Image: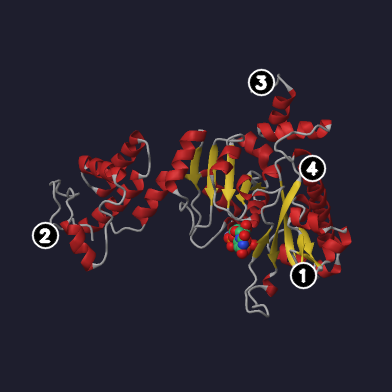
């Protein structure tokens, strides 16, 4: 990228902001109102007030965590998870005390600001009430480092205890959507990670705040997390400004589960490559970082392309010793393959599957085309009743290549 050019380009390049954010920042500095909508004037002022309140709140929570006697269990909890004081300072972690209105009162936040930040509300008794109580605070910043939201985690000692009304407290409570916070456009820790992301060309996406922090402490300070939403198109638009290699590092159970068709679409639309890190079953990055940081690093280095990962999943769960098992695996694999829009890519993987499953290449090709054209077709079924139904359906036999797969055929999808 050229280092010359106008100021917007300069701010975009040096701070890795998108065009609108760069423009907003320059306008803010120059004291100019950007007329983004009909209410731009007052809206800007309100946004500014909310940002200021959020900034003060984050500092207040942080100070409580570092110094307050009532935050001792929180400090101990963080230490027990390998999160030292330095980490708490780096990520500006905080503590929301176990009081109804400590924050609102200390910072004199009015009703409007409470609602514009999501930090609190006015309750039925007409009293101000903090949104987060007795929680460790993970502040969320925009890419330029301004606080825009918070997430709060309960301590395990208070976890899952039914409340008087019988409800169970959620593990995390996060700021709602507000004028200064849009979940689908936010990636937690991007402000901290962006330099290393640009330097390495790689961005690691995880599920939780603690996973992100774990990557930093394990020597990979290029991790971000979605904030209580699924990874979506807006996240891709942001990420592509920073890096083209995107590695999903999700808990083993949810890895590869993202809506596949969308992922492929975003890959081609935004010219990025999506990989999936394979973590040992039952672990998440935070846990693995504490137990075996080298293994975490390896999982990122050896991350597989999204499609490869999904196919491997199918094959790992299959019994490849019997013909029926191989056919069943082949059938599932074709469904996974058919989601990929590029025939050339599909074909490369088919060739690989031919070797691993011993099935006929032309039949696999035809099958993938058929499924791609009609995704509901021939989804194999398990119950005897639907087995009969599926046998009646006209479909090419995956083993023998005849036009019809008849009920006597051992290759019948079971
Ligand atoms: P997880 O349940 O995997 O939490 O949720 P975690 O990151 O492993 O948390 P720790 O390590 O036990 O502290 C992943 C993410 O989903 C959102 C949070 O953003 C969390 O980081 N989440 C989870 C919620 O918003 N609410 C919840 O009750 C649970
Ligand atoms: Mn987790």
- Decide if residue 233 is on the left or right side of residue 75: left
Nearer the viewer's eye, disc 2 or disc 1? 2
Whole-angstrom CA distance, mark 3 to mark 2, is 67 Å
Nearer the viewer's eye, disc 2 or disc 4? 4
Whole-angstrom CA distance, mark 1 to mark 3, is 51 Å
Describe the element under mark 4 as helix, strand or loop: helix
Nearer the viewer's eye, disc 1 or disc 4? 4
Whole-angstrom CA distance, mark 1 to mark 4, is 42 Å
Describe the element under mark 1 as helix, strand or loop: helix
Query: In this rendering, does residue 343 appear at all?
Result: yes
* Residue 176: image location, x then y, percent: 67, 56
Describe the element under mark 3 as helix, strand or loop: loop
In the image, 36 versus 320, the foreground residue is 36
Whole-angstrom CA distance, mark 2 to mark 4, is 74 Å
Q: Is residue 153 above or below residue 144?
A: below
Q: Which residue is mark 3?
A: 2
> How many numbered circles are shown?
4
In the image, 53 versus 10, the foreground residue is 53
Q: Which residue is mark 1?
A: 73
Q: Residue at x 33, y 37 (%)?
A: 348
Q: Earlier in the sequence, mark 1 or mark 3?
A: 3
Q: Which residue is mark 2?
A: 408
């Amino acid at each position: 990228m050229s280092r010359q050019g106008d100021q917007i380009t300069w701010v975009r390049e040096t701070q890795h902001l998108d065009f609108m954010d760069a423009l907003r920042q320059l306008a803010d500095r120059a004291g100019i109102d950007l007329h983004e909508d009909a209410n731009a004037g007052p809206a800007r002022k309100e946004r500014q007030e909310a940002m200021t309140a959020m900034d003060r709140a984050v500092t207040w929570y942080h100070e409580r965590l570092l110094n307050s006697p009532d935050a001792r269990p929180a400090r101990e909890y963080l230490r027990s998870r390998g999160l030292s004081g330095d980490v708490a300072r780096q990520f500006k972690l905080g503590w929301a005390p176990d009081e109804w209105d400590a924050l609102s009162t200390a910072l004199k936040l009015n009703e409007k600001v409470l609602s514009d930040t999501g930090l609190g509300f006015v309750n039925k008794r007409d009293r101000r009430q903090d949104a987060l109580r007795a929680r460790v605070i993970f502040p969320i910043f925009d890419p330029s480092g301004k606080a825009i939201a918070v997430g709060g985690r309960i301590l395990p000692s208070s976890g899952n205890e039914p409340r008087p009304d019988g409800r169970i407290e959620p593990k995390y409570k996060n700021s709602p959507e507000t004028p200064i916070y849009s979940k689908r456009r936010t990636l937690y820790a991007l402000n901290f990670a962006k330099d290393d992301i640009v330097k390495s060309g790689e961005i690691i996406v995880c599920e939780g705040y603690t996973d992100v922090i774990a990557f930093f402490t394990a020597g990979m300070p290029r991790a971000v997390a979605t904030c209580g939403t699924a990874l979506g198109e807006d996240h891709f638009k942001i990420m592509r400004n920073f890096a083209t290699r995107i590695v999903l590092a999700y808990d083993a159970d949810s890895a590869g589960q993202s809506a596949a068709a969308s992922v492929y679409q975003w890959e081609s639309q935004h010219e990025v490559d999506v990989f999936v890190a394979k973590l040992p079953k039952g672990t998440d990055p935070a846990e693995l970082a504490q137990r075996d940081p080298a293994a975490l690093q390896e999982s990122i280095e050896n991350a597989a392309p999204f499609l490869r990962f999904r196919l491997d999943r199918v094959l790992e769960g299959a019994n490849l010793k019997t013909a029926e098992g191989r056919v069943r695996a082949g059938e599932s694999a074709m469904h996974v393959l058919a989601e990929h829009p590029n025939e050339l890519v599909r074909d490369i993987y088919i060739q690989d599957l031919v070797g691993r499953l011993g099935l006929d290449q032309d039949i696999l090709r035809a099958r993938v085309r058929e499924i791609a054209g009609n995704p509901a077709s021939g989804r194999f079924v398990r119950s005897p009743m639907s087995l009969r139904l599926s046998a009646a359906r006209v479909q090419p036999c995956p083993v023998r290549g005849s036009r019809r797969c008849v009920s006597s055929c051992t290759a019948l999808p079971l």
